[in-house]
Image (cartoon, grey):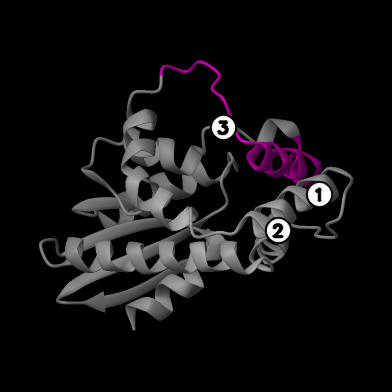
Amino acid sequence: MITNELSMSGCRLVILSTIRGLVSESKDVESKVENFSPDVIALGISPGELKDLSNWDGEPFDISSMQEIHGLFLYDLVGEDQVRLPPPSFVTAINLGIKTESLDMDEEDFTETFNKISAWQQFKYSRLHQKLRKGGLTATTPESFIMELDEQICSISGYENLEKSRELHMSERLRTICTTNSRVLAIIDFPRVSGLLKALE
């Protein structure tokens, strides 16, 4: 997992870039927590997702069609036994017994932002699903795969704006968390880290 570190409001902030589903990231999170000893772990998920993962009983759960495509591509790249849902990086962080905070929008804010996407752009997103199910990506590593997938999604302007809004929201949440903690570990989806860092400048 790629690590970025910065100081903000007297707070030492370490950001780990996660690729959802990779089993190997579980040990990376454990190691970083052991070495860094954060006061709080901030996760790039919504409050609802944090609640669901905290209460997860190990049973299978519903996933979106894009999450399914994400998983299938990762299977091909690293092997089925190296991919698991829900994301090991988030589950491991939650189970370590350290205070966790969600960074992403709540359901109401997300819905309000999503509803700004036009019907035509949603149609293009649906067409993208069909394209991806037939292949459509050339990546050979998990990192290049997730960036190529994100680039395809964000080629649709409404979805690009949605992701930028998420990055801004998460940056504001991190600023707030850093005002009351001296050591914060954030685990953020790989494609969102660059925009998040820019928003924190």
**Amino acid type shown at disc 2:** Leu
Q: What range of the chain is rendered magenta?
A: 57-79
Residue 149 is labelled as 2
Under circle 3, the secondary element is: loop
Q: Is residue 176 at least partly visible in the picture?
A: yes
Compared with 64, 175 (above or below) is: below
Residue in the image at 34% along x and 23% along y: 55
User: Badges 1 and 2: C-beta atoms under 8 Å apart?
Assistant: yes
Q: In whole angstroms, how far apart are the C-alphas of marks 3 and 2?
A: 18 Å
Q: Residues within 10 Å of mark 2 (few under 14, many from 20)?
A: some
Residue in the image at 22% along x and 51% along y: 40
* Magenta-drawn stretch contains 165: no
Q: Quadrant location of the C terminus?
A: bottom left
Q: Residue furthest bottom?
A: 201
Under circle 2, the secondary element is: helix
Q: Which residue is mark 3?
A: 85
Q: In whole angstroms, how far apart are the C-alphas of marks 3 and 1?
A: 20 Å
Q: Earlier in the sequence, mark 3 or mark 2?
A: 3
Residue in the image at 64% along x and 66% along y: 154
* Magenta-drawn stretch contains 62: yes
